[in-house]
Amino acid sequence: MWIEHRSLFLEELLRMEGRGGLQEVPCSDCGGSSPEFKCEDCFGIDLRCSSCITAAHQRHPLHRLQKWNGNYFERATLKSLGLRIQLGHTFGQKCPNPRRAFNDNFVVMDSYGIHEVLLDFCDCVEAESHTQQLLRIAWFPSTTADPKTAATFRLLKEFHLLSFESKVSAYEFYSALVRRTNNTGLAPVKDRYESFMRMIREWRHLKMLKRSGRGHHPNGVDATEEGDCAILCPACPHPGKNLPDDWEKVPRAKSWIYALFLAIDANFRLKRKIVSSNTTDPSLSRGWAYFVEEGAYKELLAEKVDVLQEKSTCSSHNAVNMADTKTSRGLAATGLGTIDCARHNMKRPNAVGDLQKGEKYVNMDYLFFSTLRHTSLQTLNVSYDIACQWHKKLWQRMTAFPISMHFDFVSKVIDFFVPKFHLPAHIEKCQTTFSFNFKRGVGRTDGEAPERGWANINPVASSTKEMGPGARRDTLDDFFSDWNWKKVVGLGTIMLRKMKEALPERTNQQIALNDLEEGLKEDYGGVLDQWRTQVEAWEDDPRQPNPFERNADVITLASVRLALAKEDEAEIQSGSCLALHEDCSPSVLISSGLELEEQQRRLRADKAACGLHATDTQQGKLVERSNSLQRRIEAWVKIQALYMPNISALRLSDQATSTNMTSVPSSETFKLWLPSQIGRSAPCDERLQRTEWRLRYAQGHDALRSLRSSLRAQTAVLKYKDRNLRGQGANTRARNTLKTIDTRIEAAASRYEGAHKALVILGGLLAETGWQSSLRPLNRQDIRSMSDLLWGESEGRRKLSWIWNMRGAGGSEKDDTGGLEDMRIEWCKARARAMRWGEEVELLQEEMRRILAFLMWEAARWDERQDSVIPTSLEHQDGCVAYAKHQAFLRRELAASFEARWAETLAQPDNINDID
């Protein structure tokens, strides 16, 4: 559509380069002939003479002019036309004692560009300072001592908001401003970059103080305490602000509704180079917002510099094991640690601090204890990707911190969790003990809040890493405040979306649990109450046996081979051994056959990996392996003929039907004719079939365990690569590691598929049933990590691949406890899902109530501030009262907006009763 009118648009753009039909038109104001000037920023296009254009811009001294030179328009300035800007008096009033700015050349930065203007300060007896005179016209001076440069409030607001949304750096913004002033380089612009940096830093700081009500405090800004300027999460519980008066008397069974959810994490992209120092570049605040107070923090870290932290006993956590070895060359800070609100993804007061050498316990401990000073809640749910290690000696380490950071952990209920995305990288025990899915009173919290916040702040890393320590802390504090504020104003939409998701899911999961229990009553009715008792005991006391863990012995291929060897030993001792070879019993024959099959599989894979251009050395090694395998197969075939005499006829028949009868099968393609390969095509000793069935069953579980282990390793390497590795060399090494893991995954999958195929055949021959529930057909989409999503799935509704539902291996459901264990675990998980969604609805209802209560509390607080300020003048008082009333109005409007938006959803009748 637009392309048809392209020429029209281009024509109008070119038309505006000329006088646009005004060649013979007189001055639009005085009617004089030959007007030469037009304004780029005034509405409409008309031409004026020099005197009229100057008079028209007394109130618009920063507009940009153009002058017709007879051929084209060229840039002109109001300064060149003699326009003077008078400060300290009302418009139109002449100052009896003006004082020109330094060198009669004042620089003003504005959204339209960088301007040089003629400026007169008022130097009357009762005149305000030059700084105040500039501020009164919304110009921000670059210095308080004889200012020569200022920036308009409009420009500072524009950059401030743009930096939040686009993460543009001050240098990029200033460069764009210079180019807007002059994009040719023919008229150099005065360099005011350092002045702009200073002004925007001061602007950020003042905005923080203003919005937090520090300008209304009777004792002034200096009375600000640590954390006073942080924007609090309205949905989190705050005693005295949004909790009932009797919240501490709530029954223990319901105390979880007033729990505080904390999430701990570190970010290694927010580095800082060794630039400047705290002495040269101190922060404008002293721990007033999100960063901890730097002096006390660094003092304690200096005392603990030589303390080595213990190594991880879980998976190989790099955050733990590499904390003392992480490179810090050229860096004053290797990253940032933070404590966030885990359910609403907001930064907490005094919960952010620099990391000097990796994610060390002492740093994270300090941040944790620092932010807890701002709460008196009795129930804490703490999420950390290495919580299984970090929490072990936490209270012992607390004793080394200042007394002000100590708290009575004995009287509190504190649970530790590992975020859901990080959990698959942990050992199996951690995956149940520290899971959000299984513990009571946490709803559908996932603990990954900091990870989502890093995506917003990471783009500023390139600019903040070059800043001094104080400037960086002030800048990041400001970004965190903006993040929190955007979260606050978005709570209406976020909470409604969560509630609309939770209500139907609560019903669906409860129906699923009811259906499961109805089906279990027939076969497992007697033990269902025992399972309920067991899981409730574990929920009350985690030291009790974990019902989500398998108690039965894990079946492995090695354990089955050992059992078969012991059976052979018993037969020899009893004299009932029917071995036809002195060195090889029937079980050893089948076990050796499986080993040969595995060597064939590996040799095929290695040959395929070499491709068409293998070196002589590679080919030589493969030929040697093939020859060795061929000799082993030939020796095995001779013994096989003793136990399976009809094999020779099968091999001859197979060769006769082969398409290429002259070719000799290679060692890796030689058909072994195990009982599962014979099937019903020829008679076979049932003892051999049953031996292979037992070994194949164990082989299937072994392959699954190997597959799960490799997938966990893959997840861990990918996560570490994404968070920590930079540069081609490091990423190439990581890709090589991933390639090795992929090979292991393919090998495990191939081994499992072979075992499953054999089990299907042997199961039919031996009438074995029940094994299919634990060893299912393996599709390609089943081979995925716990955190991987299928197409169309979301995190809240995703389903694990069935390979992760296994805990070891179980026997036949008819004669073994394995099936009962599987059923108990599955019931516990179904019950947990139903409970978590039920808790989520209750938590969301409570959080919605808390949000409204908090906003009304904030409104009342702003009402109080109207009378608490000690004004320096009537004008100051008028401004303070107006600002306080406006802020109180905004909070009440937000509360009313949220309440109206939630009304329809919250009016729905309560769904199913709470789960016992």
Image (cartoon, helix red, strand yellow):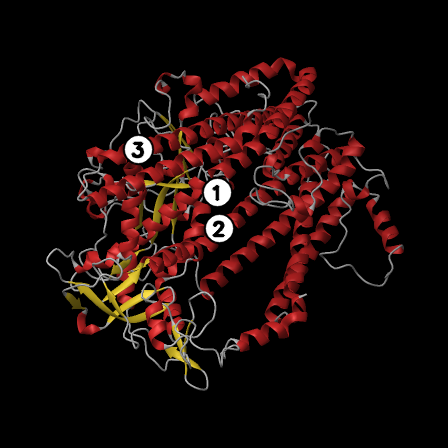
> Position of 330 compared to 557: left or right?
left
Answer with mark 3 or mark 2, whichever residue precedes in sequence: 2
Looking at the image, which residue is at 45% across and 65% down?
Answer: 43
Q: Nearer the viewer, residue 340 or 37?
A: 37
Instruction: Residue 779: name its quadrant.
Output: top right
Answer with mark 2 or mark 1, whichever residue precedes in sequence: 1
Answer with mark 3 or mark 1, whichever residue precedes in sequence: 1
Marks 3 and 1, Cα distance to the nearest angstrom? 45 Å
> Position of 36 compared to 94: left or right?
right
Secondary structure of the residue carrying tag 3 is helix
Residue 484 x %, y % = 39, 43
**To which residue does mark 1 refer?**
422
Q: The residue under label 3 is which amino acid type?
A: Asp
Residue 464 x %, y % = 34, 58
Q: Nearer the viewer, residue 266 or 112?
A: 112
Residue 251 x %, y % = 41, 15
**Residue found at the far front of this picture:** 31
**To which residue does mark 2 refer?**
719
Q: Is residue 369 above or below residue 133?
A: above
Q: The residue under label 1 is which amino acid type?
A: His
Looking at the image, which residue is at 78% across and 46% down?
Answer: 673
Q: The residue under label 2 is which amino acid type?
A: Lys
Q: Are marks 3 and 1 in contact (CB under 8 Å)?
A: no
Residue 750 x %, y % = 67, 48
Instruction: Residue 469: name its quadrant.
Output: bottom left
Q: Quadrant of the C terminus?
A: top right
Q: Are marks 3 and 2 in contact (CB under 8 Å)?
A: no
Disc on res. 863: 3
Q: Are marks 2 and 1 in contact (CB under 8 Å)?
A: yes
Classed neighbour count for the residue bearing mark 3: other residues with Cα under 10 Å, few (<14), some (14–19), many (≥20):
some
Marks 2 and 1, Cα distance to the nearest angstrom? 9 Å
